[in-house]
Amino acid sequence: MKTEILKTKRGTKKIVEKIYSVLINGWLVAFPTETVYGLWANALDEEACKKIYKAKWRPSDNPLIIHISKAEDIKKYGFVEFSYVEKLIKKFWPWPLTLIVKKKKNIGTSVSWWLDTVAIRFPKHTLALKIIEKCWFPIAAPSANSSWKPSPTIAESVIQDLDGKIDIIVDGGTTQVWLESTVLDVTWKFPVILRHGSITKEMLQKIVPEIKNTMNEEQKKKSPWTRYKHYSPETPVKIVTKTQRESIINDIKKYKNACYVWIRIKESNDFIFSFSSKKTLAKHLYSTLRKCDTYKIETIYIEEVNEKDIGKALMNRISKSAWIL
Ligand code: TXA
Ligand code: MG
């Protein structure tokens, strides 16, 4: 299949029309959101959604998020059972907060497998919202990458993984938030964070103080994401704790030809990739991991960060990239 690469500069109206016609025909398109690039299909078209799993080698029991362009549409596809959900929607939508609710009958098994729930998100990206508004159906969209690889924050990463496998890739530049949305299960009396993201526990707690940070066994079973390898470059990743730092550096010095990349916070010339804050590390993490694969190196070392605020989401992604499930 020949994949068409489109630049968003081409004109809003033309892009909206074109993407709409691709989706309505049951085809796939990669399009940016404020977090990462998504691989879009008509969420009410079972056959189209099945193509998503094939294109990105996604296990069929790992369900998709559906994207809407109006907060009230959550009730078209799911049930809002607790009053705190309305408060969260009012405060955080549109923004990277995905809500898991009990699903309605119009959501098929290609979207959310045999679960009785569906993940719903109202993204904040002007052009993406224009397209979703034009569609009378919600958009199913996982991140637009091969399942186990780092998520795409630039169009080049999508091209690496999906060129020749989908109909259109829209190049809309670098995304704004860089980590995928926070996934929050709101089917319980107190909401449970299933995936940490840039909307942090601290931010959510201001609206619902009883928020839960860890999943019990039943909740883990209902969160397929926890079972699979994610965010991993081809090169092995090792996490470096503060206490290990000096000894690992000494070890590396012993091997003259040892090739490594060290990723850390704090500007420094000694290291190949260093970032001034957790926020800038978050911005560049996925593209840096992908870049490392283009060098001939043995190991990528990443220094751990503290888990305050966005640090929790960052350590979660870093651990997964190091294969710690
Ligand atoms: O920022 C984002 O969320 C991006 C953009 C494109 O919107 N999307 C994204 O989708 O990260 P994906 O598929 O890569 O991650 C969604 C996660 C999956 O790992 C899945 O396990 C979880 O959400 N999920 C989806 N539906 C679920 C459900 N009904 N119950 C529990 N977890 C669910
Ligand atoms: Mg993903």
Image (cartoon, rainbow, N blue to C red):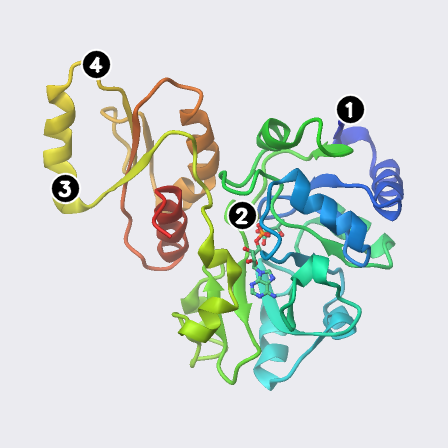
Contact between marks 2 and 4 (CB within 8 A): the answer is: no
Which-is-in-front pick, marks 2 and 4? 4
Query: Which tag, 2 or 4, sits closer to the chain's start?
Result: 2
The residue at which mark 3 appears reads as 244
The amino acid beneath tag 3 is: Gln
Give the percent coordinates (x, y) of residue 142. 63, 49
Is the residue at mark 2 in contact range of ligand 1, meaning its CB lies under 8 Å from it? yes
Label 1 element class: loop
Query: Which tag, 2 or 3, sits closer to the chain's start?
Result: 2
Which residue lies most toward the top here?
257
> For the point 52% across and 44% down, which residue is it?
178
The residue at which mark 4 appears reads as 257
On the image, which quarter does residue 297 sit in? top left
Give the percent coordinates (x, y) of residue 115. 62, 69
The residue at which mark 1 appears reads as 2
**Residue 177 numbered tag:** 2
Badge 2 crowding class, 10 Å Cα cut-off, few under 14, some 14 to 19, many 20 or more, is some
Look at the image and tell me whether residue 39 can be seen. Answer: no
Label 3 element class: helix
> For the point 45% across and 36% down, which residue is it?
284
The amino acid beneath tag 1 is: Lys
